[in-house]
Image (cartoon, grey):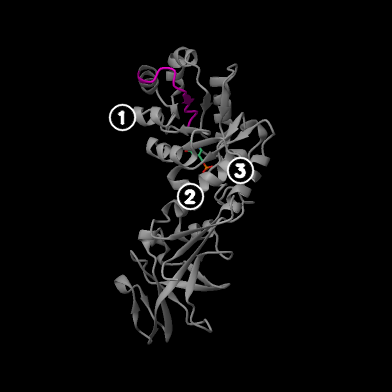
Amino acid sequence: MSSPILSIDLDAITDNWRALDGLSANQVETGAVVKANAYGLGVEQVARALAAAGVQQFFVAVATEGAALRKILGSGPTLNLFCGHLDGDTDLIRDHQMTPMLNSPEQLGRHLGLLPGHEFGVQLDTGMSRLGVQPSDWQEMRPTALAADPVLIMSHLACADEPGHPMNRQQLERFHDLTDGLTISRSLSATGGILLEAEYHFDLTRPGIGIYGGLPFADALQTVNLSVPVIQIRELQKGASVGYGNTWIAKEKTRVATIAVGYADGILRSLSSGAKLYHENTPCPLIGRVSMDLITVDITHLRDVPTSLDLLCAEQDVDQLATAAGTIGYEILTSLGPRYERRYKGHG
Ligand SMILES: *Cc1c(COP(=O)(O)O)cnc(C)c1O
């Protein structure tokens, strides 16, 4: 083994999707969010596996992702676009039959003007103040939008990973105010919302992170394993320093393993103090700073010299590594760079 290996378990991914699907009632459809290269895990393999498992509604962020996804999946599934119909994306949206979630009166005008009769949805801002039609604009554009037959009305929860947060109910009520009485399919919940009460589920859910094994879906199966070859070993005397800035100094004789991953591979520099790697189930502390392509690990306490060390494994999942880096599982996954050999197991 010469390059780091990111093993991705497609069966765990589809099992997680099925488990999330099972948390809402039978008549609620469960889609899948595969933006950002399926959260770093490889959209081609992941989307194929999810489609084979029965996903018919996919979501991506931007039109270029949608175009790539259409080539992967062919003409069957619906490809929804969170960013809507942006200036310059018309050809991609038409040629790859994407369904843009329109986010403003301007986008509605563009869509109806340039692609009349082409399927679309509407994304409403119910309080997150990020993306979506603002309630005041919705009143104004509602008759025009409804006359053109949107296929979906959606919104996004800001605090769904905190079940007790009052924002959840406020957004739910605002979503009802803006959409009750319509006969259009509605979607409010991503992973966090699926884990709230059934009244958050509406007609279609849009999980992302839970499919890939991350919190807030605590019951998720782990989907990734990251194993990195040791490329050099050295024996340090007391007082020797390790890495950029001499931030780590040996207090005694120390055996150090150098492994070939760094912040260019998504091993965030903030892991420089506190991260652990694993040799089987023995933790080995990362010492010194994370550099672009390399990190250094204290293996003095190991009986044998390992040929590789694990960053993501049974002992350390994505969220545990995220905690060590001061971030969230989403950022760890989507930062996993292009230099890994991605190996897929299972069929999904
Ligand atoms: C990313 C995203 C999702 C998926 O969210 P998860 O928390 O990963 O389940 C759903 N909806 C929108 C609008 C998003 O941006």
In the image, residue 286 sits, relative to residue 333, either above or below, namely below
Mark 1 to mark 2: distance in Å?
Answer: 29 Å
Q: Are marks 1 and 2 in contact (CB under 8 Å)?
A: no
Q: Position of residue 146 (x, y in %)?
A: 49, 15
Q: Residue at x 53, y 84 (%)?
A: 303
Q: Out of 193 and 252, give the one closest to the viewer.
A: 193
User: Which residue occupies the foreground of this view, 115 or 226?
Assistant: 115
Residue span colored magenta: 114-127
Secondary structure category for the residue under label 2 = helix
* Amino acid, disc 2: Tyr
Label 1, residues with CA under 10 Å away: few <14, some 14-19, many ≥20: few
Mark 3 closeness class: few <14, some 14–19, many ≥20 residues within 10 Å: some
Q: Position of residue 128 (x, y in %)?
A: 47, 33
The residue that mark 3 highlights is 53
Give the Cα distance between marks 3 and 2: 23 Å
Is 304 above or below relative to 2? below
**Label ID, residue 330:** 2
Work out which residue is located at the far right of the displayed protein and give it: 26
Question: Residue tagged by mark 1?
Answer: 88
Few, some or many residues within 10 Å of mark 2 (<14, 14–19, 20+) = many
Residue 136: x and y in percent read 44, 19
Please tell me whether mark 3 or mark 1 is closer to you in this view: 3
Beta carbon of the mark 3 residue lies under 8 A of ligand 1: no
Which callout, 3 or 2, points to the residue nearer the camera? 3
Q: Amino acid at mark 3?
A: Ala
Residue 63 visible, this orientation: yes
Main SS of the magenta part reads loop
Q: Is 179 included in the stretch rendered in magenta?
A: no
Q: Residue at x 46, y 67 (%)?
A: 274
The image quadrant where one finds the N terminus is bottom left
Mark sitting earlier along the chain (3/2): 3
